[in-house]
Image: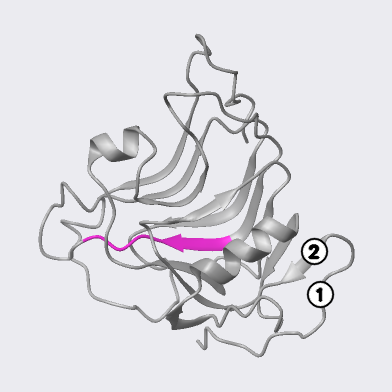
């Protein structure tokens, strides 16, 4: 199966964009780091369309969503967000440090914006953990929805292996295939901070 297809040059109607449009510049070739290009699309538009392709994402930076962000692909066997190697320790992930492929901006020690209505649909998020050892400092989260309210994730594949039917990008022993965290939900007590969301996710 070919994972890279020609991109449409026309943006979707309304507040929407195709990440392969020249103004955004994502390549979707599985080799180019598309993190910055896709983040530009998220920052400028609510509906971000990722056509068929393999989009390399830096897990040390991740894709930072905001209220109303929609990430829409062509299906989990066609649109792949492929993490580069790297990540964080459990402590770093707990404190919203590096390692999450899709996440929100969050300061656990201060006030945060309320984030709601994030939609992720019809794509795959492929984490990249070491193939020959259990990692303690390169752990990844595929989709981190902590402190995001009323999010919707549908027809999405998350894991260290590609959806069935795709050509493998690498070999990975089943012993190590369960590393990391696929999709994480949760919230924190508001305390003296502004409540930042985390309820009613589907």
Instruction: Decide which of tag 1 and tag 2 comes sooner along the chain.
Output: 1
Q: How would you rate the neighbour count of disc 2 (Cα within 10 Å): few for under 14, some for 14-19, many for 20 or more?
A: some
Count of all numbered marks drawn on residues in the image: 2
Q: How would you rate the neighbour count of disc 1 (Cα within 10 Å): few for under 14, some for 14-19, many for 20 or more?
A: some
Q: Residue 181 location in percent, x, y?
A: 35, 44
Q: Residue at x 35, y 33 (%)?
A: 95
Q: Residue 116 location in percent, x, y?
A: 68, 35
Q: Label 1 to label 2, Cα distance in Å?
A: 6 Å
The answer to whether residue 67 is above or below residue 4 is above
Q: Residue at x 11, y 64 (%)?
A: 132
Tell me whether circle 1 and circle 2 mark residues in contact (CB < 8 Å). yes
The way the protein has been coloured in the rendering is one colour
Rendered image: mark on residue 11: 1
Q: Would you say residue 108 sits in the magenta stretch?
A: no
Q: Residue at x 53, y 16 (%)?
A: 193
Q: Quadrant of residue 42?
A: bottom right
State which region is magenta: 123-129
Who is closer to the viewer here, 177 or 68? 68
Residue 199 visible in image: yes
Rendered image: mark on residue 134: none
Horizontal side of residue 102 vs 149, given as left or right: left
Q: Residue furthest right?
A: 14
Q: Dot 1 lies on which element? A: loop
Who is closer to the viewer here, 70 or 58? 58
Residue under label 2: 16
Q: Quadrant of residue 161?
A: bottom left
Residue 163 visible in image: no
Q: Would you say residue 125 sits in the magenta stretch?
A: yes
Q: Residue 79 location in percent, x, y?
A: 57, 71
């Amino acid at each position: 199966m070919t994972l890279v297809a020609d991109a449409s040059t026309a943006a979707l109607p309304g507040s929407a964009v195709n990440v392969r449009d020249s103004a955004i510049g994502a390549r979707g070739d599985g080799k180019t780091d598309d993190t910055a290009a896709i983040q530009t699309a998220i920052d400028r538009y609510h509906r971000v369309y990722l056509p068929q392709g393999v989009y390399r994402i830096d897990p040390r930076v991740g894709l930072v969503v905001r209220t109303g962000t929609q990430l829409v692909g062509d299906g989990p066997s066609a649109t792949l967000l492929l993490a580069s190697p790297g990540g964080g320790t459990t402590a770093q992930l707990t404190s919203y440090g590096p390692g999450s492929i899709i996440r929100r901006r969050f300061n656990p020690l201060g006030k945060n914006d309320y984030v709601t209505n994030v939609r992720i649909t019809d794509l795959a998020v492929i984490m990249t953990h070491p193939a020959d050892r259990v990692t303690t400092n390169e752990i990844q989260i595929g989709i981190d929805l902590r402190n995001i309210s009323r999010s919707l994730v549908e027809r999405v594949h998350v894991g260290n292996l590609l959806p069935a039917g795709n050509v493998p990008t690498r070999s990975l022993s089943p012993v190590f295939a369960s590393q990391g965290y696929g999709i994480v939900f949760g919230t924190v007590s508001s305390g003296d901070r502004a409540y930042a969301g985390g309820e009613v996710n589907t």
